[in-house]
Image (tube, coloured by chain):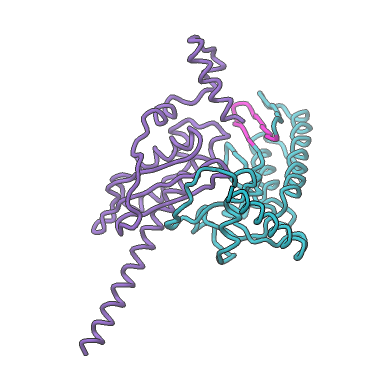
Chain colours: A cyan, B purple
Amino acid sequence: MASRFAARLLLQRLSTLRRARGTSSILVASEAPADVGGGGLFSPPGPWSALGPRCVSRVSFSTRPSALDERQNPAAVDCRSLMSEEEFHNLADETIHDLLEKFEEYGDAIQVDGYEVDYGNHVLTLKLGSLGTYVINKQAPNRQIWLSSPVSGPSRFDWDATAKTWVYRRTKAALLQLLEGEVGQLCGELISLR
Amino acid sequence: MLRAAGRRFLRLGLEHRAPTAAVAARGYHERVVDHYDNPRNVGSFDKNDPTVGTGLVGAPACGDVMKLQIKVDDATGKIVDACFKTFGCGSAIASSSVATEWVKGKHMEEVLSIKNTEIAKHLSLPPVKLHCSMLAEDAIKAAVKDYEAKKAKLTAGNAETTQTEKVASA
C-alpha cells in the first residue's frame, strides 16, 4: 500500500519534472546497481517491476558522476537522461524492423546455407546456418538494444541522440556498422544497413 | 520468451519420456541443468570482512541479478573461497555458479582474464543467453574491484592513523 502510494508519488514527480524540463532530462540509472557493497538491492521485484524504475528511484535521490568509464565500472550505475518508454519503443522498433527488411532482402541476394530470418515477440533472429546465429532484441528497462553475435558475443547498445545511432559504450561500436562488418565478412557479400 | 520455451521443452521431455531430437536440441544443456540442480558455492560472506570482495551486477527489472563474493588471502592475493547468489534464469545461475568454481584457488589478476566466451562455451549457452555469461564475467571483475578498493581504503586509513600517532607523540 505504502509502496503503491510511493510509486504514484514518484510518477507524479517524474511527470512534473518532465513537463518542466522538456523531453529528456531525468537522471536515472541506465543499467544496474553499483558494484561496491550495495545493500538492499535484492528485494524481489514487487510493485516497482511494473514501472521498471528500481533504478530510477535510486538515482533520483543520489548524486553520481555522469561520466563513468564502463570499462572500469562494469554494470555500475550510470546517470544519463532516460528517454520515455514510448520514444524508446518507437526508435528501437524502427531500427529492428529496418534490420528485418534489409536482412530479408540480403538473404534473397546471397547464397548461404541455412539462411533464415525470424521475427517474433520483438526478437529478431538471423540464422546463418553453420556460420552462427544473431539475436537482436529490446531491453526496455535499460532503453537498450541487446545483440548476441557469434563473432563478438553479447553487447548492449544505447541510443546516442547526437550521433543518432545505437552505441555500445564499452567498445564505442555502433550497432549498424558492427552488423554490416560482421555479416558482410561471414557471408562474403557486402551488406548496407544504414 | 525463449526462457519459458526452454523450460516448456524440458518439462515436455520429462513428461513424454521420449523427447524428439528437436526437443532435446532446444532444452537446456545438461551442464546448465546440473548447476541448477546442484549449484556450487551458494551462500554469502560478510561483506564488511576486509578479505571479502563483493560484486553485485545486473538489475531485477532486466531479469538477472548476480552477487558474487570472493575471499582473498591478503598475503598472497589468491582467492581462497567464493560464493554466489543469483536471481535469474537457469543460464544466469549456471554462469555464476561456474564463475565461483573457476575463481577458487586462482590469483586475483588471473581471474580478470576469465572471459564470458569461455563460460558460454563450457555451458553451451544458446545465442540468446550469452548475456548471462557476460554478466558473470562482470560479477567477477566487480568483486575483485571491490576487494581492491577496500584494501586501498584500509591502507589509506592506516597511514592516516600512523600520522596522527606520530603527531600526538611528538
In magenta stretch: residue A113:
no
At which x and y percent is residue A159?
69, 53
At which x and y percent is residue A46?
56, 43
Where does the magenta region start and end? A122-135
Q: Nearer the viewer, residue A5 or B8?
A: A5
Q: Nearer the viewer, residue A176 or A90?
A: A90
Above or below B130: residue A73: below
Q: Is residue A171 left or right of residue B48?
A: right
Q: Is residue B51 left or right of residue B92?
A: left
Q: Nearer the viewer, residue A37 or A165?
A: A37
Magenta region, main secondary structure: strand
At which x and y percent is residue B107?
31, 51
Residue A171 visible at all: no
Q: Say which residue appears at 48% left-offset and 50% top-offset.
A: A41
The picture quadrant where one finds residue A61 is bottom right
Residue A110 visible at all: yes
Q: Say which residue appears at 26% left-offset and 78% top-offset.
A: B162
